[in-house]
Image (spheres, rainbow, N blue to C red):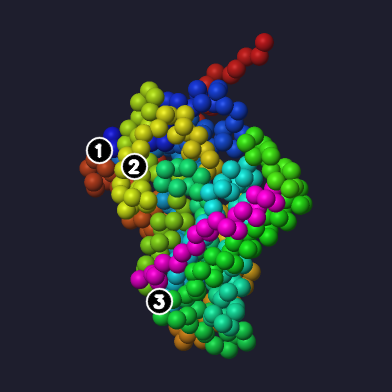
């Protein structure tokens, strides 16, 4: 099945968003995301008119919404972020570790996103740091970046954290580099057990401090006895933690970061079709040998699932820990390179660039080249005001 050209999340919102907003009571953050995605790269946001200096061809380019949940606004942001991380990479093995909470916690997480996502990130980071510091395992201070994802391939809620972890770290006295065993980081069962214990202990703390809310179908968990029964049952559930083999060198790490850091719940290229009732999209069924399949949902159900993954305002989903913690990252990396005997030339300060220059340097896309004659340069000749500025004023009365 081929995806029809031009079908995007924005089209789904434009066709079905009004009805969905009218029939659902949505938080302001969800309304903002829907409006941003609908307006992205349209006349509503304004733009600029470019003209080819040679053939006279004219094109109008509209502005992006820059919303972090928009499928069309992540490429340049992602590439800039990766550029900033290059200087933090060392010529060592890096491991990919994933922490997932049991599905029984998903309803609680949806209703308490900020609290529960913080618990997930905290539990995962403390597990890695504690085990790596333990002389029985590594006995070193590691560094890693943690990336929160909240979705599965079917767009349902599936909170988990991807971690890119150094295969070794600084000794406790900071006099030498301690490498992990070849192609092995830490025991998965030990990580899973410690992660479970930390998360459930923190969960008890936030319940007792009154930070959780229990609307609708989880209202029975307001009762302390019911909550404790629920929490204790989770000790007997499977807590999935897995560690993949090390990446294929630094380039492998960069490719991974490019795929995961600024990913959203679904990209436009996975959408297969849209009609008056349904949305079809491509997904990978991990439970069936990673087979690619097509899934069809009612439009309102597709929108509901998409909005499950709108993060709280200003919530930071990419965090750095240990050696890569922001406060002393540069000093830590300099010491690591010294102990690893790695010589790195100082990078020059970046000059101020236009977004067109950044796009050409980072992505190799030259938007100033005329798409018609292929020779002339496109020059901005006019600014296109947002369409709302051109609308007649509304009358009250």
Query: Which secondary structure lies at badge 2?
Result: strand
Look at the picture and state if 201 lies above or below 393.
below
The structure residue drawn at horizontal position 67% and vertical position 50%, both measured from the top left corner, is 229
Residue 314, percent from left and from top: 62, 48
How many residues crowd around disc 3 within 10 Å: few (fewer than 14), some, or many (20 or more)?
few
Q: Are marks 2 and 1 in contact (CB under 8 Å)?
A: yes
Q: Nearer the viewer, residue 3 or 395?
A: 3
Residue that lies at the very extreme toward the bottom in this rendered image: 175
Residue 102, percent from left and from top: 54, 53
Residue 141, percent from left and from top: 58, 77
Residue that lies at the very extreme toward the top in this rendered image: 397
Query: Where is mark 1, residue-wise?
Result: 1
Residue that lies at the very extreme toward the right in this rendered image: 209
Residue 217, percent from left and from top: 62, 36
Look at the picture and state if 47 lies above or below 93.
above
Residue 318 visible? The answer is: no
The structure residue drawn at horizontal position 50% and vertical position 52%, both measured from the top left corner, is 149
Q: Is residue 241 magenta?
A: yes
**Residue 126: quarter of image:** bottom right
Q: Specify the segment rendered in magenta.
A: 227-248
How many residues crowd around disc 1 within 10 Å: few (fewer than 14), some, or many (20 or more)?
few
**Residue 205: quarter of image:** bottom right
What number is the disc on residue 282?
Answer: 2
């Amino acid at each position: 099945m081929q995806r029809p050209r031009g079908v995007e999340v924005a089209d789904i919102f434009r066709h079905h968003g009004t009805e969905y907003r009218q029939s659902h009571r949505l938080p302001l953050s969800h309304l903002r995301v829907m409006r941003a995605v609908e307006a992205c790269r349209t006349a509503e946001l304004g733009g600029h008119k470019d003209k080819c200096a040679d053939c006279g061809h004219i094109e109008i380019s509209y502005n992006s919404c820059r919303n972090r949940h928009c499928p069309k606004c992540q490429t340049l942001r992602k590439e800039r972020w990766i550029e900033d991380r290059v200087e933090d990479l060392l010529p060592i093995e890096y491991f990919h570790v994933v922490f997932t909470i049991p599905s029984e916690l998903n309803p609680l997480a949806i209703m308490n996103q900020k609290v529960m996502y913080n618990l997930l990130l905290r539990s995962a980071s403390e597990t890695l740091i504690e085990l790596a510091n333990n002389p029985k395992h590594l006995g070193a201070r590691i560094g890693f970046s943690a990336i929160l994802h909240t979705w599965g391939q079917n767009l349902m809620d599936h909170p988990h954290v991807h971690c890119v972890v150094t295969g070794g770290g600084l000794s406790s006295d900071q006099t030498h580099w301690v490498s992990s065993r070849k192609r092995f980081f830490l025991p998965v069962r030990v990580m899973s057990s410690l992660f479970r214990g930390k998360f459930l202990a923190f969960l008890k703390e936030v319940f007792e401090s009154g930070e959780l809310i229990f609307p609708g179908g989880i209202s029975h968990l307001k009762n302390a006895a019911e909550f404790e029964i629920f929490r204790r049952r989770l000790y007997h559930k499977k807590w999935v933690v897995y560690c993949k083999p090390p990446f294929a060198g630094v380039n492998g790490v960069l490719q991974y970061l490019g795929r995961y850091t600024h990913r959203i719940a679904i990209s436009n290229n996975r959408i297969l079709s849209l009609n008056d009732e349904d949305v079809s999209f491509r997904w990978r069924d991990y439970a069936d040998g990673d087979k690619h399949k097509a899934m069809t949902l009612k439009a309102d159900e597709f929108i509901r699932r998409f909005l499950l993954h709108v993060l709280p305002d200003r919530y930071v989903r990419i965090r750095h820990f240990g050696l890569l913690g922001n406060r002393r990252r540069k000093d830590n990396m300099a010491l690591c390179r010294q102990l690893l005997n790695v010589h790195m030339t100082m990078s020059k300060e970046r000059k101020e660039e236009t977004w067109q220059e950044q796009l050409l340097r980072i992505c190799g896309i030259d938007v100033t080249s005329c798409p018609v004659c292929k020779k002339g340069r496109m020059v901005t000749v006019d600014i296109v005001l947002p369409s709302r500025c051109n609308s007649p004023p509304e009358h009250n009365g």
